[in-house]
Amino acid sequence: MSRSNIRRRLVLAAIAAVFTIPVAIAAQQPAAAPSAILLRPARVFDGTDVHEGWTVLVRGEKIERAGPAAQVGTPADARVVELPGATVLPGLIDAHSHILLHPYNETAWNDQVLHEALALRVARATNHLRATLDAGFTTLRDLGTEGAGDADVGLKQAVNQGIIPGPRLIVVTRAIVATGSYGPKGFDPRWEVPQGAEEADGVEGVTHAVRSQIAHGADWIKLYGDYRWGPNGEARPTFSIEELTAAVETARSSGRAVAVHATTPEGMRRAAMAGVETIEHGDDGTPEVFRLMAQKKIALCPTVAAGDAILQYRGWKKGVDPEPASITAKRASVKAAIAAGVTICSGSDVGVFSHGDNAREIEMLVDYGLTPVQALRAATSTDARVLHMEDRIGSVAPGLLADLIAVEGDPTKTITSLHHVTFVMKGGVVYKGEGTAAR
Ligand SMILES: [Zn+2]
């Protein structure tokens, strides 16, 4: 970080302190943070494997050293943070979130999209971002505002400018759907009802929507390759391969990648043929379509936590009632994806359930067939690679951004440890645990 950046950050922190926290608390804040911080946990999961007895040295916004304690040493100017019994990990990544939604058992999706004021949704989202960071998630790929316009772009700016605490955000703005396929649905045909995403059709129309969303601040492009618009409300493919290909080529030309929502084998096949980079959900994926994805190096975000939550909202008493057929089928499809060699990313579809509970996905990936280490890789180094950010985040290694968290115990043995986050640092700034900065 340059000196001018450091100065800027200090000024921003001072401004934030004046406006957001009581004077009595502000007076207790140290004048300036020491230049180096040494994290001394029991072990470090570096994004790939676990290492007992490692320490991590952070200087400014980056990791300077990580390795066996004796090799890392303790520089004279370092402030030591003791984390006995804890595991330090890269800040967790959730590659599929909806920061502008809140759980459907609180308010149905239709009502959130149509009834809730934009300012209300944004105000709620600031709480969601704080809860997410507090839970150890330092990066989100937020896959659609669901009717909240381009509000994700402003929220990202608010986080980046230090106005509100939150994870790094990769945003897609409104997402793109084929006309007539999405929701809210079920109104008198006289009414043109605002939709939860931007409608576009044809190669020209889709190309324009991609360019327009880029102009509005999209980092990735998200399309719905199928949706529940079949004659009986079942999921059916929406965009043609030509439309999807136009989206991919337009996005790629601008240096951006495409994520596609698809649950049907044909929707997934078209997305794969078009060269998208991630497929979201993939519920009814067949071994054939997973082989195609593996061959084309397309990652799958199975979003297992969302389906599980929705069925519980519909009355399934998990652990008491027998497992619903759709959950059993989902287990089988995730297993088929793993068997086919598809890269599994960790993306929870949080927003369907409570923000800050994102670790449910990682935990459930273990329940669905990954080892704890594989699931932790998915939420760190794999997600970072899928997001093209592996040179900045997702691993504990020198030169990477100091996005580091600590959890009680060893999550490589007991994945539920992820629910006990005791320390959160993003870009070298401590947000939770010893040495938390004013915010
Ligand atoms: Zn979603």
Image (cartoon, grey):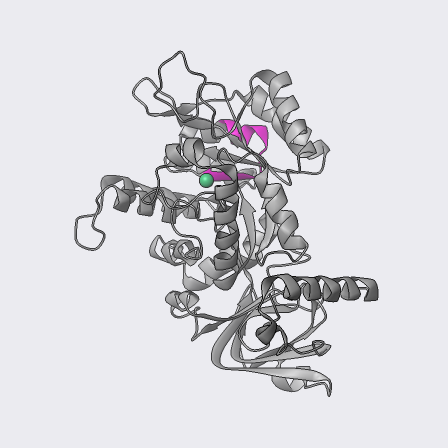
Q: Is residue 427 shown left or right of residue 350?
A: right
Q: Residue at x 38, y 22 (%)?
A: 229
Which image quadrant: the N terminus?
bottom right
Q: Is residue 268 shown left or right of residue 331?
A: right
**Residue 306 position within the rendered picture, expressed as x and y whole percent measured from the top left:** 37, 45
The answer to whether residue 380 is visible is yes
Q: Residue at x 41, y 47 (%)?
A: 339
Q: Residue at x 54, y 32 (%)?
A: 175
Where residue 370 sits, quadrant-wise, is bottom left
Q: Is residue 47 shown left or right of residue 236?
A: right
In the displayed orientation, state which residue is furthest to the top.
190
**Residue 359 position within the rendered picture, expressed as x and y whole percent measured from the top left:** 43, 58
**Residue 68 position within the rendered picture, expressed as x and y whole percent measured from the top left:** 61, 81
Residue stretch rendered in magenta on the structure: 270-280
**Residue 286 position within the rendered picture, expressed as x and y whole percent measured from the top left:** 39, 35
| Membership of 274 in magenta stretch | yes
Q: Is residue 365 above or below residue 188?
A: below
Tell which of 180 and 196 is nearer to you: 196
| Membership of 40 in magenta stretch | no
Which image quadrant: the C terminus?
bottom right
Where residue 416 sits, quadrant-wise, is bottom left
The answer to whether residue 344 is visible is no
